Image: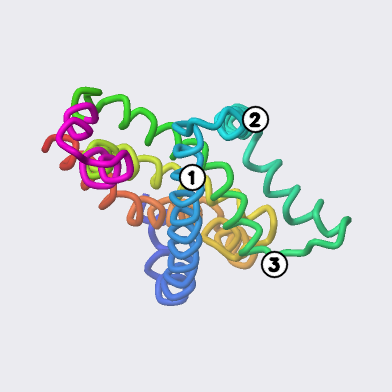
Amino acid sequence: MISFFRPYAEYGGEWLPVLLDAMLKTALLSLSAFALALVFGLLLWLFQASSAPALRRFASLYITVVRGVPLLAVLFLLYFGLPGIGVTFDAFTAAMLGLALCFAAQVAEVFRAGMMAIPKGQREAALAVGFTPGQCFAFIILPQVVRVVLSPMIVTFVSLLKDSSLASLITVDELVLTGRAMATEYFLPLQIYIAVGLCYFLIAWPFSLLSRRLAVR
């Protein structure tokens, strides 16, 4: 048992800076992708709630198709497929876009569920006292939706963080790819991948605690 932990004492000083740098890249990738997913997901939700049938059909079709397509296939399409038609992204950008496009569908569904949790009478009351539909949405409905969806949004971010490990397959130098390179160099895959898993846990755990606390409130 002691021999299992000996590599951490022997190589910890070498591994720690490398893993911390990979953690930073993973966090940056995840936060950037989630920020884009929030924007795309909000647009999809607004399209779903639109009075224009074309926008509603587009949003419904997008969500249905994207939720049925593996994330890895989207990443491969963006990084390996699009250069065939002259559109080229670097690995980080392709991973960020792929994660954002896929998780936008989930974000839109979270927004939709939050909207359904708001009683319809509040909109009717706001319109009755003189609010315009835009003011009603901006000042009455949206603040309550944000409060309702905040906890599940954090859970969605944690899911995106874990799925960002697939970006290693298109050569993004994040935690998994860094761990694979370290395992090849040191021939200690078990210890190194345990350390990589701990790094993911250290990033995700505070968000999980925050989600639980917000859910209780």
Residue located farthest toward the left when viewing the structure as drawn:
217
Left or right of residue 60: residue 138: left
Report the quarter where the C terminus lies: top left
In the displayed structure, 71 sits above or below 91; it is above
Query: Which-is-in-front pick, marks 2 and 1?
Result: 1
Q: Measured from the top left, where is residue 42 in percent x and y?
A: 44, 44
Q: Measured from the top left, where is residue 191 in percent x and y?
A: 47, 55
> Does residue 101 show up magenta in the picture?
no
Mark sitting on residue 43: 1
- Residue drawn at x 50%, y 61% as measured from the top left: 29
- Residue drawn at x 54%, y 32% as measured from the top left: 52
In the displayed structure, 75 sits above or below 91; it is above
Which of the two residues, 170 or 35, is positioned nearer the viewer here?
35
Q: Give the mark nearer the N terminus: 3 vs 2.
A: 2
- Distance (Cα) linking label 3 and label 2: 25 Å
| Main secondary structure found in the magenta portion | helix
- Residue drawn at x 48%, y 34% as measured from the top left: 50
Left or right of residue 129: residue 54: right
Left or right of residue 51: residue 67: right
Q: Which residue is mark 2?
A: 65
In the displayed structure, 131 sits above or below 78; it is above
Span colored in magenta: 123-141
Q: Give the mark nearer the N terminus: 3 vs 1.
A: 1
Q: Amino acid at mark 1?
A: Leu
User: Disc 3 on helix, strand or loop?
Assistant: loop
Q: Which residue is mark 3?
A: 90
Which of the two residues, 45 or 137, is positioned nearer the viewer here?
137
Q: Measured from the top left, where is residue 68 in percent x and y?
A: 63, 28
- Distance (Cα) linking label 3 and label 1: 26 Å
Which of the two residues, 14 or 98, is positioned nearer the viewer here?
98
Q: Amino acid at mark 2?
A: Val
